[in-house]
Amino acid sequence: MHTPNNLLIALFTALTLVGTACTISNPVFDFDEDGIVDTEDCAPADPEIHPLAEDLFGDNIDQNCDGTDGIATDVDQDQFSATVDCDDRNPLAYPGAPDPLGDEIDQNCDGIDGMAVDLDQDQFSSAVDCDDQDPLVNPNAAEQSGDETDQNCDGLIDPPVDADGDGFPNHLDCDDNDPAVTLCPSCPETPQDPPAAFPDNLNCTEIFSDNLEAGFDGGFLSFFTNTQGYSWGYSTNQAHSSTRSLYFGDIGSLDYDGGTTLSTLTLNPIGTLGGGTLKLHFWVWADIDEGSHTDLLCARVGDSIQGSVNPHMEQQCIKPLYDFSVTDPDQRWQEQSLYFTGTRGEDAAIEFLFDTVDELNNSGEGVYIDDISLYDCS
């Protein structure tokens, strides 16, 4: 017969054994069954997103959980990945780097040479403010007519108007009182012929060529839009060669239905040789409104500029040259060559302009530009 003490000891031992047998360790969960436990998975409910996933740049999704869209490589080992480093081959160029003015290098990745400051304190830095000494001048300012000042930094002295109602605003129309006259220089409805006997009678030297894979190589590439709508940028969705091109539209929805928008991209400066003719060669992919009075798609070449819209640059339209009967997306890349007056040896700029003109029929994918070359011809 057990004593009371022995009974208590036996009861305590039994309870201890039961408690030990019922202990449950913390289980390791992988809810989306992607091979990565939930505690290490930035999207535990999505099997397509995990630290080992392929992360394609341009879809605005961080598939591999590294905090950026695209594979975060750091070629120059400056602690900034290629997704945020404007020159991942230069360890002195990265966001926040010292950026001395005058060396024509954007070391701090703000889009300009020198520090982006806001001298007039209008909430727009010198990188986008066309007059950083005047707080009434900035990209969001209201344009005032008749004062010879470009308040909203769209490159135009006064708001565009269309006095003759031909669908072409006065900054593109060389006679806005005559509806029979449209673009200036005129933009024909049929393709233009190149100079006679080209290239036999012209000696052309390539002075610039870029497939845009590493960004604009050798100068400044700037984007501008006169509204909060869509603008130009880089895309990996379509490319004529390799993987990247310049794109006008929304990279997420793949349309340009952002309202009435005029947007340009400018490449400059490009050194020239003083020839009398400049030949611009590029490839374009377009899914835009085919109407003759909407969606202006034009190229400009002229003296190098630091602004984004220069109404004095020579302009030719691309849309009349484009074959919209091609509907297969894989066959839409079309080669273009345009000829412009030389810049007398001055540095040149290339500009592509896209103007929706109105808010209608903007549901297409937009415009891609790739493989841009410029030749100096004499």
Image: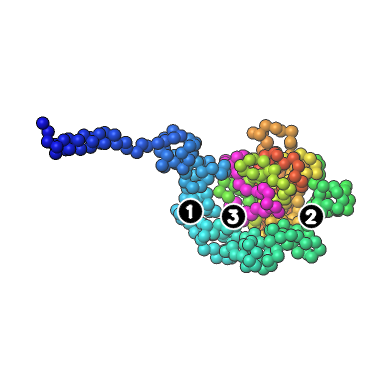
Q: Find numbered disc 3 in the image and state the secondary structure of the residue it sits on.
A: loop
Residue 80's tag is: 1
Q: How crowded is mark 3: few (under 14 residues within 10 Å), some or many (20 or more)?
A: some
Most common SS among magenta residues: loop
Q: Residue at x 54, y 59 (%)?
A: 108
Q: Residue at x 32, y 36 (%)?
A: 24
The amino acid type found where label 3 is placed reads Gly
| Magenta-span inclusion, residue 364 | no
Q: Which residue is drawn at 20% across and 38% down?
A: 12
| Magenta-span inclusion, residue 240 | yes
x and y, in percent, of residue 191 in the image: 78, 41
Quadrant assignment, res 243: top right
* Viewer-closest of 224 and 285: 224
Residue 113 visible to the viewer: yes
**Vertical order, 68 against 269 (above or below):** above
Q: Find numbered disc 2 in the image and state the secondary structure of the residue it sits on.
A: loop
In the displayed image of the protein, which residue is found farthest to the left? Answer: 1
The amino acid type found where label 1 is placed reads Phe
Q: Which residue is drawn at 29% across and 34% down?
A: 22
Q: Find numbered disc 1 in the image and state the secondary structure of the residue it sits on.
A: loop
